[in-house]
Image: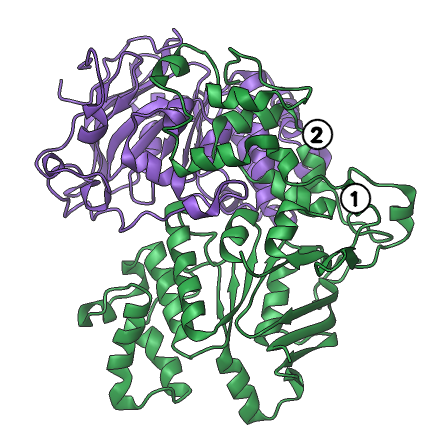
Chain colours: A purple, B green
Amino acid sequence: MGPGVIPAGRPSVDGNLPVVEVSNLTVNFGRLKAVEQVSLSVSMGEVCALVGESGCGKSTLAYSLLNLVPPPGVITSGDVRFRGRSIIQMSRKDLNALRAVDVAIVFQAAMNALNPVITIGRQVDHILRAHDGVFRTQREGREYFEHLLRLVRLSPERVWSSFESRLSGGMKQRVSIALALLLRPSVLVLDEPTTALDVLNQRLVIDILRDLHDTLGMTIVFVTHDLALVAELAQRVAVMYAGRLVEVATVEEIFYARRRHPYAKALIEAIPSVMGDRALIRSIPGQVPNLLELPTGCRFTPRCPQARPVCHEAEPPLLADPHNHLVACYVANDELEGVMVAP
Amino acid sequence: MSLLNVDNVTHRYPTTVSALPVLNGVSLDVEAGSVVAVVGESGCGKTTLGRLVVGLVKPMTGEVRYEGKDIWALPKREWEVYRRSVQVVHQDPYSSLNPGLTVEGTLKAALLHHHIVRRNEVRAELFRLLDLVDLEASASFLRRYPHQLSGGQRQRLVIARAMGLRPRLVVADEAVSMLDVSMRVSVLDLLLSMRSEQQLAYVFISHDFGVVRYFARTGRILVMFFGVVVEEGPSEQVITHPRHPYSFVLLDAIPVPDPTLARRRRSEATMQAEERVTGEPATTGCVFSNRCPYVEDKCRHEAPPLVEVVPGQDHRAACWFPERVPDLRSLVEASLPGLGAEVGGAQDGNAREGSADDATSGNGPSPAWFGLAGDGRAHTIAPGAQPS
């Protein structure tokens, strides 16, 4: 195993078994590696955030969780397992039975994914018919959807016979979440769930996702570029930069720990907040490197305020401290005292 | 004389089905070189107000004046000058650029149309503009098409296009909401730097008070709710001492980049989020009364006027009970300095030492945060509380 590998099958910190395990995953778009050597496991009932700027590979990683990487993307190495079963090797038939039933995804701008020419109710019926094994009767499925609509705080009477054009952006986003939950998946993947929503609708979606986690025990993996959303929602955070994981930690560690990746710190400092001191907000200089022209050494070096000569030489390994807080940075790991756990 | 006034404008689109007009008696003053931010949720009429300022929408009643003259009565030549002087940066840099035009084509057309520079000076001007917005000023960059640019680069190009016309007022309609958080601050900084260099005024439209605070720190804020201005005042004043419940709701909804604070506020949620979002505007009385936590009988029958709430501060609110609205401070209690330190990363002084241990073994928030717990509130987070 190369650097940056979390041993698969190992229980996470809280002792829960992993539901989704990604090991050594690499996804290629031609020569370009959108995701490179990523290992990550998500345990039952966990809320995990994938964070990074546009072009960091976080959406691609999220799609890989359902083996849904859009062409020309190809998973070239590594594996993704759901409850121990590899979904990379799975047959098309098994995959169809798994998607939306065990692992569901709400795509970015999912509100634009609703069919505009049939009612929301008809779309639900279509899903129920395609997966007729999940509920005993069509009626039972419909009733469950009505229950879900109430969970996302929408009125079933209003939504069922509506066309999507009659719903606001925030309502459509919530309908998309309810649709994703229809077949009782145990893992919900959301790609940028609150982008394009205004502040009030964003707050509502945050509250709903929290409720889903608390009441249904839903395992949630969400992708975002906004660390404020992470602070509100996540328990564990995986920070990606230019296709690689650079830090995996609990939400407290990301925000407060002394040892953390300069990129995570920069992302936090870039948030214009109403409460913090305005003078401390700063943008991240430069941009995510072109994945075809990566700098040698650490990929963040060109933008890193703490870069040292060693950073230009070789890619830093992802190292864990005794609490499984992983950081891939020479400078941050330099301060790591005591036992260094090479994972 | 203000650079631009919107005077008591009411507007309704031909397709508006709601009983309420899109804009209902809205007034706005923009002084030369100043910043006015317009804040409100989706559908509250902020964009219509922006379109009105730019001259894209003709109001049904009321007047829009540029340098004291009604823009809809301007002779053709002066209309051209006004249209050149008031530019707009739209929300979505993916749809506000023509995909069939190169960077050069995008920037050149307006420069030539308005005779900003002579034909043989265009090239030099293009490079100057690209340089101004921190884009690569090279011949190869001029040949690129929008699809070859990132979101941040596109928005910079849109800004360059607007700045090329030497505007005196720029309407920035959610100019950064489609950008990554990491890009937002740099684009805001760019806009601010133009302001100081060219005595530029901005009408800055946004739903996010965080962004507004960063951008309009010396300017004014106008809070709109379904076509009505509910609060107006100096930026810091409105943010730290909101006097309309809607302003407070908007402030309260912003996610805070701090997990401990987020969790603490969660347990103190006073209002159900759905009411905050789904309550329809009222057609009689105060427009906000259906969502307002402090609503009384009076509010349902009589619409409050926009009147001064803090004497001498030029701070107005349209609320019968402005004194009931809590200050921003109540959201964070004494944590303002603490939060600043956390956000700024200057946490060495007060943050946890050897903290990774506590975090994973469930010891809850850091000692720095325990200090905040003694604020006399009923729901403070207990030591050892786990993230829910």
| Residue A154 in sight in this render | no
Q: Is A269 on the left-hand or right-hand side of B49?
A: left
Residue of label 1: B323
- Callout 2: chain: B
A168 or B294, which lies in front?
A: B294
Outermost residue, top side: A15
Q: Residues within 10 Å of mark 2 (few under 14, many from 20)?
A: few
Kindly report the distance in space between the C-alpha atoms of the residues bearing marks 1 and 2: 18 Å
For mark 1, give the secondary structure: helix
Q: Is B281 on the left-hand or right-hand side of A213?
A: right
Residue B49 location, x and y as percent? 63, 66
- Looking at the figure, which quarter contains the N terminus of chain B? bottom right
Q: Are marks 1 and 2 on the same chain?
A: yes
Say which amino acid is labelled 1: Glu
Residue found at x 45% / y 68%:
B195
For mark 2, give the secondary structure: loop
Q: How many marks?
A: 2
Disc on the earlier residue, 1 or 2: 2
| Residue A248 in sight in this render | yes
Residue B26 location, x and y as percent? 72, 66
Say which amino acid is labelled 2: Thr
Image quadrant where residue A122 sits: top right
Residue of label 2: B270
Q: Residues within 10 Å of mark 1 (few under 14, many from 20)?
A: few
